[in-house]
Image (cartoon, grey):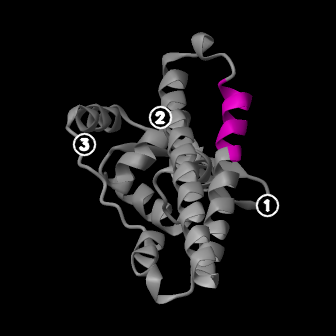
Amino acid sequence: MALSHAILSALTERPCSGYDLAKQFDGSVGFFWHASHQQIYRELTKLEQQGLVTAEAVPQEGRPDKKLYQVTEAGQALLRDWIAQPSKGSPLKDELLVKLFVGYLVPPETAIAMLQQERSHHAATLEEYQAIEQRYFAKPAAMTPAGQFQYITLRNGIHYETAWLTWCDETLATLRSMNQGQGE
């Protein structure tokens, strides 16, 4: 997937300025596709040049005009074609797993501390996803089709974080038992 697809996908919800899009991106598509604000602005310029988005200048008092970007029919056609193509598997690049692969080089308590920190991060992410679910998706049967598709992507995130925490707890138990074995 290219950044352009993620931006076009985010813009399908409503027209946005580059700033608003970057904020929205951080809170929706950004959960599974990260991009800096600078990358987003650069890509918006390219998408506009390609006719995949249009920009409307909106005057603001005391500030430069704001550009509101909207997906064109050509942009929607590109998304439809892209959706119909088979997805490529995402390569797993996880620094933590590389560290654990050679974790025998450090005392178990070093790996335990590292995993506890990661566990806290994943637990917080799960709580955030569950709060989003309660706030925006409390009644799945009453959702629009767009809402239902957004909900299934959120559910993937919830399942991912839940599975990650299960694995982490198993790994912490293993490391703690190794640590106890060394102390004897």
For residue 46, the mark is none
- Amino acid at the residue labelled 1: Gly
Asked whether residue 4 is in view, the answer is yes
The answer to which quarter of the image holds residue 102 is bottom left
The CA distance from mark 2 to mark 1 is: 29 Å
Q: Is residue 99 magenta?
A: no
Q: Is 8 displayed left or right of 182 in the figure?
A: left
Amino acid marked by disc 3? Ser
Which dot marks residue 62? 1
Residue 182, x across and y down, in percent: 58, 82
Query: Which badge, 3 or 2, is on the more N-terminal residue?
Result: 2
First to last magenta residue range: 127-137
Occupied quadrant, residue 18: bottom right
Residue 87: mark in rendering: 3
Q: Earlier in the sequence, mark 1 or mark 3?
A: 1
Q: Are marks 2 and 1 in contact (CB under 8 Å)?
A: no
How far is disc 3 from disc 2 in space, using C-alphas? 20 Å
Residue receiving disc 2:
12
Please tell me whether mark 3 or mark 2 is closer to you in this view.
3
Tag 1's secondary structure?
Answer: loop
Is residue 129 rendered magenta in the image? yes
Inspect the image, locate mark 2, and give the three-letter code of the amino acid beneath it: Thr
Residue count near mark 1 (Cα–Cα under 10 Å), binned few <14, some 14–19, many ≥20: few
Q: Is residue 26 left or right of residue 167?
A: right
* Dot in front, 2 or 1: 2
Residue at x 49% of width, y 42% of height: 10
Q: CA distance from mark 1 to mark 3?
A: 46 Å
